[in-house]
Amino acid sequence: MNTALLVIDIQNDYFPGGKMELEGALAAGQKAGQLLQCFREHGGRHIHIQHESLRPGATFFIPGTEGIRIHDSVPHYVGEPIVYKHFPNAFRETNLLEILRGWQTERLVICGMMTHMCVDATVRAAADLGFTVWLAADACATRALRHEDVSVTAGQVQAAFLAALTSYARVMTAEQTITLLAQESAP
């Protein structure tokens, strides 16, 4: 099956010292880096998705800042495709779908940040567009949330969104994903 990797918003602002630090960002970035390396080593197609915040009053991913840069755990190399987005859904008002259709992509492996926003929106959109989706759960990170008087830990947010996304994607670890891809390509 023709597969491509989407690396969503693994940018400096989500890491320690950034403007919107996520819980587990370093570990998730490392796992995403392993996936990216696997695709690079085996000639797999992959795309970096980079969020640029253009809305007035934005506090992170501001163009021209260090925080918007792709994190060193998943370095972007010259010549590799990159899609710039301004909304959580990586397909909205971007050329992502055009690129994937040009590659005749059937399946997407997705990793990135934030699980409850951009990863969620992109996984659901990808499934709705007809792609088979694999989500590398440990290569994603999120943060604690609050609604009225209820505080929700990052672990609870992660678990709830991953559980919901099982209706749209095969949710597994990065290692499981790499193993399954290797089995498919074995003679």
Image (spheres, rainbow, N blue to C red):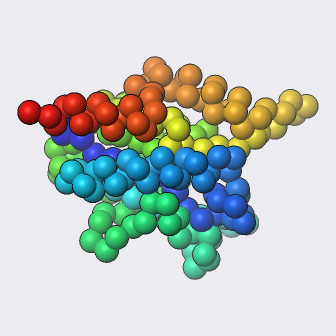
Image quarter of residue 41:
bottom left
Image quadrant occupied by the C terminus: top left
Q: Where is residue 158 shown, x and y percent of the image?
A: 63, 33
- Where 163 sits versus 111, above or below? above
In this view, which residue lies farthest toward the left?
187
Q: Where is residue 52 shown, x and y percent of the image?
A: 54, 65
- Residue drawn 28% across the image and 50% down it: 39
- Residue drawn 64% across the image and 57% down it: 14
Q: Where is residue 11 shown, x and y percent of the image?
A: 55, 62
- Whether residue 57 is visible, yes or no, is yes
The mark tally for this picture is 0
**Viewed as shown, does residue 24 lie left or right of 34?**
right
Image quadrant occupied by the N terminus: top left
Q: Where is residue 177 shown, x and y percent of the image?
A: 36, 34
**Viewed as shown, does residue 66 lie left or right of 70?**
right
**Viewed as shown, does residue 125 lie left or right of 78?**
right
- Residue drawn 62% across the image and 51% down it: 25
- Residue drawn 58% across the image and 40% down it: 115
Q: Nearer the viewer, residue 3 or 61?
A: 3
Q: Nearer the viewer, residue 77 or 47?
A: 77
Q: Nearer the viewer, residue 142 or 84?
A: 142
- Where 57 sits versus 20, above or below? below
- Whether residue 97 is visible, yes or no, is no
